[in-house]
Structures are given as structure tokens and as C-alpha cells.
Image (cartoon, coloured by chain):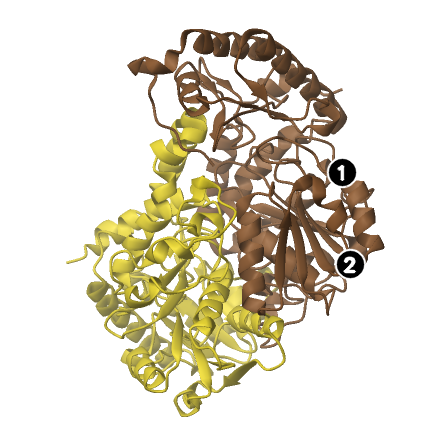
Chain colours: A brown, B yellow
Amino acid sequence: MTDFTRTKAMFDLPEGVIYLDGNSLGPLPRAVGTRVQEMLNDEWGQMLITGWNKAGWMGLPTGLGDRIGRLIGAEPGSVVVGDTLSIKVYQAVASALEMNPGRKVVLSDNGNFPSDLYMADGLLRSLGPDYELRVVDPEEVAAHITEEVAVLMLTEVDYRSGRIHDMKALTELAHANGVVTVWDLAHSAGAIPVYLAGCNADFAVGCTYKYLNGGPGAPAFIYVAPRLSGQVRPALSGWLGHEAPFAFDLDYRPGAGIERMRVGTPPVIQMTALSSAMDIWDMADMADIRARSIELTEQFIAGVEATCPGLELASPRDPLRRGSQVSFRFREGYAAMQALIARGVIGDFRAPDIIRFGFTPLYIDKDDVEQAVEILADIIANRLWDKPEYKIRQRVT
Amino acid sequence: MTDFTRTKAMFDLPEGVIYLDGNSLGPLPRAVGTRVQEMLNDEWGQMLITGWNKAGWMGLPTGLGDRIGRLIGAEPGSVVVGDTLSIKVYQAVASALEMNPGRKVVLSDNGNFPSDLYMADGLLRSLGPDYELRVVDPEEVAAHITEEVAVLMLTEVDYRSGRIHDMKALTELAHANGVVTVWDLAHSAGAIPVYLAGCNADFAVGCTYKYLNGGPGAPAFIYVAPRLSGQVRPALSGWLGHEAPFAFDLDYRPGAGIERMRVGTPPVIQMTALSSAMDIWDMADMADIRARSIELTEQFIAGVEATCPGLELASPRDPLRRGSQVSFRFREGYAAMQALIARGVIGDFRAPDIIRFGFTPLYIDKDDVEQAVEILADIIANRLWDKPEYKIRQRVT
């Protein structure tokens, strides 16, 4: 059993703050500062260039990949960490496209995170006018999976509503039509159990600064199914994905398996912080996380619906179809969220009228949820956003 | 005048080490640990998601870009920091290619860093069989600049020999033939004065973990000439290069000027370390750096040639044609470098027979060079690498 009292004590949250925005940026684990300081002084400072071997820096991308892989149902040796999520989306879609020569359509939905769409659009425009990014409503994705489609690119959990796509069913349908799948797990990894191997997924990508608590700008990850990784020609073919990076050959030869999805020099300081954050995840079981997450979101929805008139649930009511976040539509959502933040309850706002709350059992408990509901109810009942002391500005990622 | 005694005191170098490998990985500036700790505790820990605005994280890529820009002769607002150098090479070459529709050849040389060639090759292969990466000898580049060429992609300072390409002359020749230029400044930025604006360069890229001392895996930078940046369609079109990232529009619209070359969420911890390292550069003048660098490399070459028989200079003898590094060919170079490292003089080895030394005036002085020569002479004279206590392993980037 995951000991949530113990995990909560491992985070350093500010006094008086109830942090329901771990789905945007996870909070600071207490151990990160000491670990990063050790890395700076004892590794970079003392080992200098030899830290790449002596301190194991060169192995961080695959070592971290395996630890994340456990949380998303990936086979050992199938995940590698590096770059940003946008870059990994590009790499996955471009690599997947090459596996389907002759097909020119990438299918996605309008609930996808915009950067995924931008990256795919930019890629397809560079490949020529025959290529098409086809964006449909989330409910219509299945109907558009045809033999015309090369790649299906979806974010499993909708960043606004928390709606979960059925990865297993859509992947099966995709494969039946010869379509290669790319799953974005930005709001899945550490939020809900994911079964990449069990779903027979092809490519997946995700970020580590949300539920995994790797810190602002923590690197992304990419998964390639072991049955594919030996034959993929990696897009973004950088030297650290080369079979022998330090031979300095003029010609590119892809490295073994997932190693070929590495590109440039890994951000060691950032990866050290992430590694420390993953120590907490090593103590957690995704089944426990999911059970607790459902309890918290159910408690929050029930509390808000009982006390906050005017707020309309924008997330699926069925907890099995919902990620670890809850969103409500509210006409004055932006102003209300500002007031809420001023009162120490941190969620975020997504245009045009969505207020969004992330529930992260590693450090959020039932008392937090109860308090958050009370404060939100007070703000709504008294329209506190009209009072000048609650007008603050916010911008979130 | 740059006060080199003062700058040297700002680095934390291990006792007994003469570090001549700052061209691979710069050493730890003393202030970085404290600054990173502040960022972790006071920014990430206390501000959480609001750090993107309150702590100025969102402005780090352009703020750092301007500070680097001063060292490379770039106009204010023309440089942005992010990603790895391999990714920025890809972004620059892909964006440059689009400016020359109809032309299909990227010209480079076999002295270029292999990852640049790999990234360009991967890009061109994805664009189709008509595209060609043409790789010639460095001395033959000028002769191959023709109206067939779309993009000239060169590393200004050769990573092995330190040979400097004539950026001004080659850029002029390129423009006369309608060729767009991409300059890799990995071994130039902080090593030699660079005049991007003065040379009328189009695109440039570089890394910050070598001479700039940003730390292992510190992010890269990209330059786009202001006369071009408003019309470039950026390859790798991510959300933070969007005109309004937080509008979450489904369609991509490039941001103003250099902002459009941003891609994903910036690595804030890594950028904080780089920002602290740049505080030292803010005290330095590139003309002073260059003058001191030439003194040190001339001293080293004279010393080695007088005392180390069998070593053959592999760098240009003319200091004006040489970067801030010196390389020698030596048949037993790998073994000799291992012995040298065991004696506290850290340089590196590049296959097949190059031993390479970087000279970094911010923290290396004449006494260091004198000692390094003495130790190298002792090793060569006594073939110390044959003794078992000197056999250590090394791998470098």
C-alpha cells in the first residue's frame, strides 16, 4: 500500500496553500535541493567532464525512462527521457509517418493540446502539400480512423476537461486499419494507470513537470514499442542516438532500440531534480494513486455541486472516464480563480470559461479538498472577485 | 579591462587540477549553487506555478539570448535560448531551406561536428530523395558555393583542430550565390570574437556548456538576423513560439521576431544555472579574452614543441586562424591523455590520434599553462602511460 501520509511529508508546500495545480507544475519535493546541490558540487564541480561516466550522467535518460516506464505500463528499455514534449511529439509523429509510406494523413482531435497540433502541422507543411493534419471532435475520432490515415495522434487525457480516450479500443481500431498510434500522456503519467504494452501502443510521449514533479521545464519522455524500436528510423537523428556517439563518424547509424530516440546532450541538472522527484514515485503504486484520486475528485465534485451554484461540471461525471482533474464552467471563472488563488487555493483557468483543479494524492488529502470547497463556496456566495484586494494576475502553463 | 584574477576566483576548480577541457564542459562557477538553491526554494517551492510570471521564468530564453548575443556580435532581440544544439541545428537548417524553395542542396564540410551532419541528413531524408547533403573538405567549401546550394551549414571553429572558417568571406560568397547561411558557434561563443551582424549572417546556433560554463546539458541558442526573423516560418513550431501561447488556439501563428524560434517549456533550473554563469561573462570583454587566449595558446605550443618530441601540431600555427584550443597529433595520444588526466591535467582525446586542449582565460592563466607543459613533457619523456597506475578510462563530450 502506498503510504500517502509519508509521501505528503516529502513535499515542501508553502504554508497556507492548497495546491490543486500539480497538473500544471508539480511542487518541490523536499529532497531535490540537497540532491541538486550534491550534483553541482560533487559531480560537476569535482568530476568536471569525467562526470559523464563517473557520475552516470550519460545513463540518466534511459535510467529515468525505466522508472517512468513502470508507471505507464511500458516494457523495460522502451522509454527514454529528453528534450521537451513538443520536440518528442514531432519526433514520434515524424518517425511514425515514415512507417506508413504512401499515407499522408495525421488524425487528431480538437481536444488535443495545441502544441501537439502546431508541431504536427509544421511537420506536415514541411513535407509538402499532399500531407494533411485532420482535426475532428474527440467523439468522432473512431469514425475517422480509416485506411487513409497514416498516424493517429491523440492526447489520452483532455487537458481541459480531463476526459479519457479509450486507448485500448482506439489503438485496436487503428491497427485494424493499418494506422500507427502516437499517444500523448502529459495528463496521464502519474495521474491514471496507463498500460502501453497492454494496449499494444506504438509510440507515446509525455512530460515530467506535471504529476511527476520534475520541476519547471523538466524534460519529456518518449516510448517506442520494443517490437518497433529496432526498425524505426528516428526523426531528429542526433549524435547521442547514434550507435557509437564517440566514434564521431560522419554517417549516422541508429543506436540499439530506444537509445536511437535520444538526440543531443541531456540536461543533467534538470534530470537530477527529476531523479530525486522519482524517488517518491518509486514508493507509489498506480492502483492506490488511482483509487485515492477518484475519492478526492468525487468528494470535490459533490462538495462544489452542493455549495457553488452557477458552476457547471465540465469533466465527465463517470470517474472511470475522467483523469485526475476536475473542471467546471463558470461565466466569471477567470475572476473567481484569481480570488481563489488570493485565498491560497491554487487551480488554474483555461479560456474561455473553464476553472480547472488537479488532484494529486501524493500530497493532497481529504482535508485539503474539504477546505478548498469551503473557500470556493465563500468566494462564489460573496462574489469576492469584485473586491479590489482579490484582483491579482495569473498566467499558467 | 577584464580582470582575470577576479574572474578566476569566481570558479570552483578542484585542488590540483589544471582544467584544459572547458571547450567540452566549462567548470562550476562558485555562485551557481547558491543561485540554483534560491530558485528551487524561493521560486519553485514558494511560487509554484506562479513562478512563470513572478520569477520571470518565461522571459529567461530571450533574456539569456541577449546576454549571449553581446558576445557574438548579435543585435539585441535576435537570440533565444532553448533545446539542445542538435535541435537548434535542425530548426535553423529546416527554416533556412524553406527560404530557398526550389534548391535542394545543403552544403557542409567534413570538419563539422558529426551531430550537425546527422541532423541535416535526417531532415533531408525526410524531405525526399531530391534533397542532398553535400559534404566536402573544409578547404573546398568556397569552391562548392554555387547557385545550386540552398543552405550553407558550417561550424565556424573546427572541434578537433580549432581551425576558423572565414565567416565574413564565406557569407558574402554565399549571399552572392543566393545561399542562406547557418553558422554553428559551439566552439566560437566565448572563445573568439564573433560578429554575426557585421558578417551579415543569416542563422546561427551554439551551445552554452562549453566556454559559457552553463553546466552539463545547458541549453543551446539560436540567432536569426532581424531582417529575416519576421518572415521565417519556423520549423519545430511549438506553442511557446506562438503569437499568443496562452490563448490555446488550434492554429499556429508565429510570434514576433526571434520569439517564434522558441518551441516548448524552457528548462528553468538549467537556465538559472546558465544565468548565474553569465554573470561572469557580463564582466568580460571579448577583445581581452581573445588577446589572453592567444597568449596562452602560443605559450602552450612553444612549450610543447620545445619539450615533447613526437607531438605534431594539428591546429593552425597562425593564431588568427585558430580558435581557443590547441590540438596535437600523437600516435599514442589516447594513452598519453589518460596519463595526463591521472596527473591532474584534463584535456581530451578525439579519434584517431588527436589530443586536444582548451584555453579559457576566465580561469586559466600562464602558470597553469607552464605546469601543464611540464607535466606533459614528463609523461612523454618517461612514457608514463605504460605504467599501470596511469591507466584510467575517459569518455568525453
Please name the amino acid that badge 2 sits on: Leu
Q: Earlier in the sequence, mark 1 or mark 2?
A: 1
Q: Is residue B128 above or below residue A20?
A: below
> Residue B9, can we see it?
no
In this rendered view, identify the residue nearer to me: A381 or B220.
Answer: A381
Name the residue at the left extreme. B1
In percent of width and height, residue A325 lies at: 61, 26
Return the mark for residue A166.
1
Residue topped by disc 2: A228
User: Which secondary structure lies at badge 1?
Assistant: loop
In percent of width and height, residue A313 lies at: 60, 21
> Residue A397, can we see it?
yes
User: In which chain is the residue bearing label 1?
Assistant: A
Q: Is residue B154 above or below residue A374?
A: below
User: Which secondary structure lies at badge 2?
Assistant: helix
Q: Residues within 10 Å of mark 1 (few under 14, many from 20)?
A: few
Please name the amino acid that badge 1 sits on: Asp
In this rendered view, identify the residue nearer to me: A85 or A337.
Answer: A337
* Mark-to-mark CA distance, 1 and 2: 22 Å
